[in-house]
């Protein structure tokens, strides 16, 4: 999978976050006391590699992991600056809660956080749902970027 590039200075409005809040779904930064719980959840749903990246995101101050939750239930997450500076990801939404706009909300909110920290562009590493990223934030594929930074990853 190729990496993708996003212009952070041309992000769409994130109206979906407000709509989700009306449904009692909150998008917010993860807090240090939640690190082990969230990383275990990510490992269970998405594997050890993503859990490792999330653990790094929790170690930043402020953390660079955003969480989607309803009440005390974790629904999804999105990280940035976990494996490389300027990289968005990993991100995931629990299968039972897909199709509600959570992925889009996490994507745009996380990219807005990156913009607020001074980034002009973000790289989506090894982007899976290419069309999703193209449609939601105008991401473009970076030629010659596969396998990218993950080429020597131990599995």
Image (tube, rainbow, N blue to C red):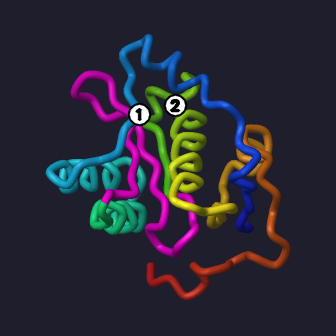
| Residue 74 horizontal side relative to residue 50, left or right | left
Q: Mark 1 and 2 residues: CB-CB less than 8 Å, in contact?
A: no
Task: Give the image quarter of residue 148.
Answer: bottom right
| Mark before the other along the chain sequence, 1 or 2 | 1
Is 114 a magenta residue?
no
Check the image and name the residue furthest to the top.
Answer: 22
Q: Which residue is mark 1?
A: 27
Q: Which residues are magenta?
A: 62-89
The residue closer to the viewer here, 20 or 61, is 61
> Disc number at residue 102?
2
| Residue 82 horizontal side relative to residue 36, left or right | right
The residue closer to the viewer here, 35 or 7, is 7
**17 is higher (above) or lower (below) than 31:** above
Residue at image position (62%, 66%) is 125
For marks 1 and 2, give the one nearer the viewer: 1
| Residue 103 horizontal side relative to residue 52, left or right | right
| Crowdedness near tag 2: few (<14), some (14–19) or many (≥20) residues, C-alpha within 10 Å | many
> Disc number at residue 73?
none
> Which percent across, then down, holds residue 80?
49, 60
| Residue 66 horizontal side relative to residue 59, left or right | right
């Amino acid at each position: 999978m190729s990496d993708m590039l996003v212009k952070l200075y041309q992000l769409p409005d994130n109206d979906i976050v407000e709509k989700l809040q009306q449904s009692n779904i909150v998008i917010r930064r993860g807090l240090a006391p939640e690190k082990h719980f969230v990383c275990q959840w990510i490992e269970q749903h998405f594997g050890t590699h993503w859990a490792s990246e999330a653990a790094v995101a929790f170690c930043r101050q402020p953390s660079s992991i955003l969480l989607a939750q309803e009440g005390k239930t974790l629904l999804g997450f999105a990280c940035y600056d976990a494996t490389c500076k300027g990289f968005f990801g990993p991100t995931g939404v629990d299968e039972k809660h897909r199709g509600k706009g959570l992925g889009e909300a996490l994507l745009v909110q996380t990219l807005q956080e990156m913009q607020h920290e001074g980034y002009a562009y973000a790289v989506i590493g090894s982007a899976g749902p290419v069309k999703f990223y193209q449609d939601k934030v105008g991401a473009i594929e970076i030629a010659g970027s596969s396998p990218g930074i993950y080429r020597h990853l131990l599995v």
